Amino acid sequence: LNFQNARFVTSAPDIRHLSADEGMEVAFAGRSNAGKSSALNVLTRQKSLARTSKTPGRTQQINVFALDEKRRLIDLPGYGFAKVPLEMKLKWQQALSEYLQARKCLRGLVVLMDIRHPLKDLDQELIHWAVASDLPVLVVLTKADKLKSGVRKATLMKVQEAIPGFGGDVSVITFSSLNKSGLADMEHVLFQWFEA
Ligand code: GDP
């Protein structure tokens, strides 16, 4: 398993259009602007695999990246756009909870959050859905470079203290796409999920 081998396979307009439920998938989710594309690019050592700085409010596609014949990374659309109509938001939430419940090849969910704004309502909801489906969750606190060491550690501890409240298998790391801190931790977790 080599994340560098990631290649773009396809974009799906929604969860129901994903390819056959075979092999193994790990999904990446987060509020828009959380740093998901940057993290995916760092993980795969590719400058523009996942496009950064997308137009806010646009309907986004689900991007599928293959690591090898069996393993895929699923880049879910960012959530939390203020401008998106409520009806679309609810539809998306419904589809997402279905995906987390029904997708057998799903091995885990990575939820990325800006370390300066962790555990917003939708983040928490997502974690609850994953735990309810017996999926392990990795909370990635992104843009760790934006905080001084003391504040960074305090935030990590605060989030870690909230984790038992979710039950299930939830772990937390800090991450920076800028200086690649946390990359080894992320890879370690993904290796475990993909090997199991
Ligand atoms: P996405 O919408 O979740 O895919 O977020 P992006 O990856 O496009 O990042 C949103 C913005 O945050 C961009 O301006 C990135 O350059 C910036 N960003 C992402 N990751 C980091 C990071 O680790 N450190 C810093 N300082 N900025 C970051």
Image (cartoon, rainbow, N blue to C red):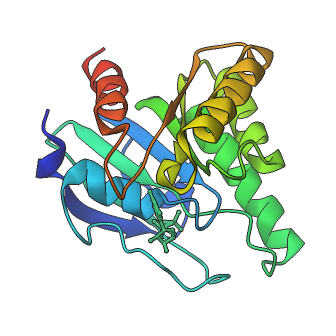
Query: Where, quadrant-wise, is the C terminus in this rendering?
Result: top left
Identify the residue shown where x is 78% and y is 78%: 84
**Residue closest to the far right:** 86
Rendered position, 51 above or below 119? below
Identify the residue shown where x is 73% and y is 27%: 158
In the displayed structure image, the side of residue 122 where residue 181 appears, left or right:
left
**In the image, residue 120 lies at what x, y percent?**
79, 48
Rendered position, 95 above or below 169? below
Identify the residue shown where x is 88% and y is 71%: 86
Identify the residue shown where x is 70% and y is 29%: 159
Q: Quadrant of residue 125?
A: top right
In the displayed structure image, the side of residue 177 where residue 84 appears, left or right:
right
Rendered position, 105 above or below 64? above
Q: Is residue 30 visible?
A: yes
Query: Where, quadrant-wise, is the N terminus in this rendering?
Result: top left
**In the image, residue 138 lies at what x, y percent?**
52, 30
**In the image, residue 129 lies at what x, y percent?**
72, 32
